[in-house]
Image (tube, rainbow, N blue to C red):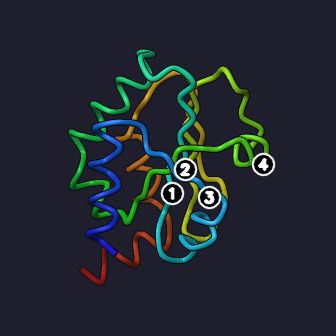
Amino acid sequence: MRLLILFLSIMFAQSAVSTPSSGQSLKHAKWKNRVLLIHAPDPNAKQNLAFQKHVKAHQEGIHDRDLIIISMDKSLRDRFTVPDNHFTLILIGKDGGEKARQTNQVNLEKLFTLIDGMPMRRAEMRKK
């Protein structure tokens, strides 16, 4: 599973992650992974480029927090009320609930701090 997370993270760092059945991926991730949903309407927009840079720089943190990155399809954009023309990141917890949303700036450190404060993550850190 960790190899899959690392693979997906690296793939995203090189280009946008495409997941044909994003909704199914969310169902499979529940209780196993945290999910970072991304909608980047313009692959060359500064937010998307900054996100790719952050992903490359934070591979270990992404892997350590069981985080997978999924590009939102239309059904997920509708489900989470994400406009078609806005860059959006949404953090989904292992319980399947939305935990955070970023629209203007990318801040993985802030998301990591939020994740590290979650009860499930604190229990994971105690076990390691």
Q: Residues within 10 Å of mark 2 (few under 14, many from 20)?
A: many
Does residue 74 appear left or right of residue 29 in this picture? right
Q: Residues within 10 Å of mark 3 (few under 14, many from 20)?
A: few
Q: Can you say which quadrant of the picture contains the N terminus? A: bottom left
Q: Nearer the viewer, residue 57 or 125?
A: 57
Residue pointed to by mark 2? 91
Between the residue at mark 2 and the residue at mark 3, the CA separation in whole angstroms equals 18 Å
Between the residue at mark 1 and the residue at mark 4, the CA separation in whole angstroms equals 15 Å
Between the residue at mark 3 and the residue at mark 1, the CA separation in whole angstroms equals 14 Å
Q: What element does badge 2 sit on?
A: strand
Q: Is residue 14 above or below residue 84?
A: below
Task: Identify the amino acid type marked 1.
Answer: Val
The answer to whether the residue labelled 3 contacts the one labelled 1, judged by CB atoms less than 8 Å apart, is no
Does residue 116 appear left or right of residue 82 in this picture? left
The answer to whether the residue labelled 1 contacts the one labelled 4, judged by CB atoms less than 8 Å apart, is no
Q: Quadrant of residue 109?
A: top left
The answer to whether the residue labelled 2 contacts the one labelled 4, judged by CB atoms less than 8 Å apart, is no
Where residue 62 sits in the image (x, y, percent)? 32, 54
| Among numbered discs 1 and 2, the one appearing first in the sequence | 1
Frontmost of labels 1 and 2 is 1
Residue 21 - label: 3
Residue pointed to by mark 4? 79
| Among numbered discs 3 and 4, the one appearing first in the sequence | 3
Residue pointed to by mark 1? 35
Q: What element does badge 3 sit on?
A: loop
Residue 102 - label: none
The answer to whether the residue labelled 1 contacts the one labelled 2, judged by CB atoms less than 8 Å apart, is yes
Between the residue at mark 1 and the residue at mark 2, the CA separation in whole angstroms equals 6 Å
Where residue 45 sits in the image (x, y, percent)? 45, 16
Residue at screen point 53% across, 29% down: 40
